[in-house]
């Protein structure tokens, strides 16, 4: 399947528009779906805490992503693939990465929403790490494995050391796929954050009072950013073909 | 005369597939050793053992010894230095996404050379030797990967010469190169052998006949015969299969 086919752009666009409308309708429905006005301060607080903590995810994400890249390069470039450590770590990561983000979202609700009074960096870090790390590590591993062995052979044959080969050639060749993986991982975080907010909000009768930034709009913003990141990541990954065409003949 | 390379009982396995079945041969200094044989006979594998780039394959295992100037290549601690002593030209050119100039300057720079004038001189000399200079001298800054297949092949030859190797390994370099340019490169090889030892794997038996001092015939991972080129191409080499292959009635 040739992903650079324009037909796939069109399909991606159609899906994007459809999903946009779905989300739009969905978020418009929610306030109506809720009745009563038994104000639940605790949940309301949680929600504002989560809004208040969204920005905290940015540095956490950055650190976690850098760590994931380091782990992936360590696995692929330093550990012999036959070694027991490699096989164990690789398995664990594959299993963690295959768990749907919904499950991590539920864990997030459990960790963040249930003990509503204390949302700490610590808990956020756990969830963001679980959401981001296995996925990013795995996609980075695949990106590194996808770099043709002939590139490595050619650069090493010229006397370059491992550091130079990795930074100068393996990383640039793998970069489109790596960044595609990172974008998807971030989009998973955003979508999960949206999920947590939806669940919280369902428990709150007056959505507008939770924060100056309304419920529906924040969910829409989160989900839309998640979606655009996913689409972007597929476009970025598509460029792999072009780069390889220019890079290796 | 001391051997440049001594290979003894070299076995290579890709997982379960055995690619070399215990090969022993010596390469003399400043000779051109032609290596011929049908596809899959292990010629490329043999070259990659020598500069230790085979180890990037997963599941590879190598037995036996290879000595360069009497020193076991596996006991050389500076493997990067070892690779700089060997120039490698592989059949499918790997154009590094660098400019033509930077492709050739890569190895000298990696080895620590900083002087622009010296690097300029190396780039020009190597591109001349690879019969590419005239075609690219006005666009040294354009991407090496934008060149035609044959030009890229010659760029990899220039690159392999750029670190002044003691041993030059060429693996079927003429596949994508037109006959006239091939002849020009062959002439360069004849003069280069004064400075280095050349291992010439070739799919053109006539090329081995034209260039090689000695020729080795490989088949299915075995070294069938190695002898003076005149003997290999004579009417009575030691092995019948050598005769058949050289005379094109093989299979
Ligand atoms: N990367 C590889 N993985 C597995 N088997 C390989 C690999 N490269 C070569 N081989 C096997 O090793 C044998 C020798 O191959 P090669 O050295 O490329 O021969 P030649 O260069 O003479 O065509 C063949 O049987 C081939 O299938
Ligand atoms: Mg070959």
Image (spheres, grey):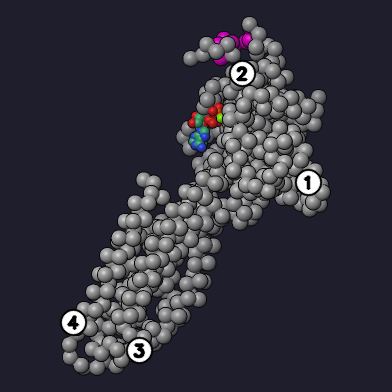
Q: Is mark 4 within 8 Å of ligand 1?
A: no
Foreground of the two, A134 or B201: B201
Image coordinates of residue B113 in percent, x first then y, are 78, 50
Left or right placement of residue A4 versus residue B69 in this view = left
Residue position for label 3: A211
Foreground of the two, A157 or B216: A157
What's drawn in magenta, residue-wise?
B236-245
Image coordinates of residue B178 in percent, x first then y, are 62, 26
**Mark 3 or mark 1: which is in front?**
1
Q: Secondary structure at mark 3?
A: loop
Real-space Cα separation, disc 2 to disc 4, in angstroms: 82 Å
Residue position for label 2: B205
Question: Few, some or many C-alpha atoms within 10 Å of disc 1 (few <14, some 14-19, many ≥20)?
Answer: few
Q: Secondary structure at mark 2?
A: helix
Can marks 1 and 4 be said to lie on one chain? no
Are circles 3 and 2 on residues that touch, CB within 8 Å?
no
Residue position for label 4: A33
Real-space Cα separation, disc 3 to disc 1, in angstroms: 65 Å
Real-space Cα separation, disc 2 to disc 1, in angstroms: 36 Å
**Mark 1 or mark 4: which is in front?**
1
Image coordinates of residue A195 in percent, x first then y, are 31, 75
Q: Secondary structure at mark 4?
A: helix
Q: Chain of mark 4?
A: A
Real-space Cα separation, disc 3 to disc 4, in angstroms: 20 Å
Q: Residue at x 74, y 50 (%)?
A: B109
Residue position for label 1: B120
């Amino acid at each position: 399947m040739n992903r650079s086919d324009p037909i796939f752009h069109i399909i991606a666009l159609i899906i994007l528009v459809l999903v946009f409308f779905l989300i739009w309708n969905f978020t418009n429905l929610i306030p109506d779906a809720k009745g009563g006005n038994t104000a639940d301060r605790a949940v309301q607080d949680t929600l504002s805490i989560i809004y208040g903590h969204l920005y905290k995810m940015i540095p956490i994400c950055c650190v976690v992503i850098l760590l994931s890249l380091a782990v992936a390069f360590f696995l692929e470039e330093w550990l012999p693939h036959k070694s027991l450590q490699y096989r164990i770590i690789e398995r664990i990561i594959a299993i963690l990465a295959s768990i749907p983000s919904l499950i991590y979202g539920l864990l997030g609700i459990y960790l963040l929403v249930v003990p509503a009074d204390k949302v700490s960096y610590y808990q956020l870090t756990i969830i963001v790490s679980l959401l981001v790390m296995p996925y990013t590590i795995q996609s980075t591993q695949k990106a590194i494995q996808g770099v043709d062995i002939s590139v490595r052979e050619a650069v090493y044959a010229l006397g370059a050391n491992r550091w130079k080969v990795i930074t100068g050639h393996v990383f640039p060749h793998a970069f489109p796929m790596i960044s595609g993986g990172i974008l998807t991982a971030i989009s998973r975080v955003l979508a999960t954050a949206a999920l947590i907010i939806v669940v919280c909000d369902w428990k709150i009768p007056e959505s507008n009072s939770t924060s100056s930034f309304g419920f529906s709009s924040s969910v829409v913003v989160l989900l839309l950013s998640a979606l655009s990141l996913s689409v972007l990541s597929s476009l970025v990954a598509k460029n792999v073909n072009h780069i390889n065409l220019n890079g290796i003949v | 005369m001391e051997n440049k390379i001594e290979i003894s009982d070299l076995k290579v396995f890709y997982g379960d597939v055995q690619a070399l079945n215990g090969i022993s041969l010596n390469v003399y200094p400043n000779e051109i050793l032609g290596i011929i044989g049908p596809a899959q006979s292990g010629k490329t594998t043999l070259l990659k053992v020598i500069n230790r780039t085979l180890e990037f394959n997963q599941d590879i295992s190598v037995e036996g010894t290879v000595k360069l100037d009497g020193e076991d290549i596996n006991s050389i601690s500076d493997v990067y230095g070892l690779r700089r002593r060997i120039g490698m030209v592989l059949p499918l050119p790997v154009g590094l996404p660098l400019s033509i100039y930077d492709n050739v300057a890569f190895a000298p720079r990696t080895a620590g050379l900083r002087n622009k004038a010296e690097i300029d001189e190396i780039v020009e000399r190597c591109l001349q030797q690879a019969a590419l200079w005239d075609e690219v001298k006005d666009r040294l800054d354009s991407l090496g990967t934008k060149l035609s297949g044959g030009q890229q092949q010659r760029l990899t030859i220039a690159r392999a010469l750029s670190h002044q190797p003691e041993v030059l390994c060429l693996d079927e370099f003429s596949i994508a190169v037109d006959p006239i340019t091939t002849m020009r490169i062959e002439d360069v090889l004849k003069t280069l052998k004064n400075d280095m030892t050349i291992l010439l794997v070739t799919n053109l038996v006539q090329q081995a006949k034209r260039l090689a001092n000695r020729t080795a015939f490989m088949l299915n991972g075995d070294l069938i015969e190695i002898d003076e080129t005149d003997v290999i191409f004579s009417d009575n080499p030691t092995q019948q299969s050598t005769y058949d292959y050289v005379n094109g009635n093989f299979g």
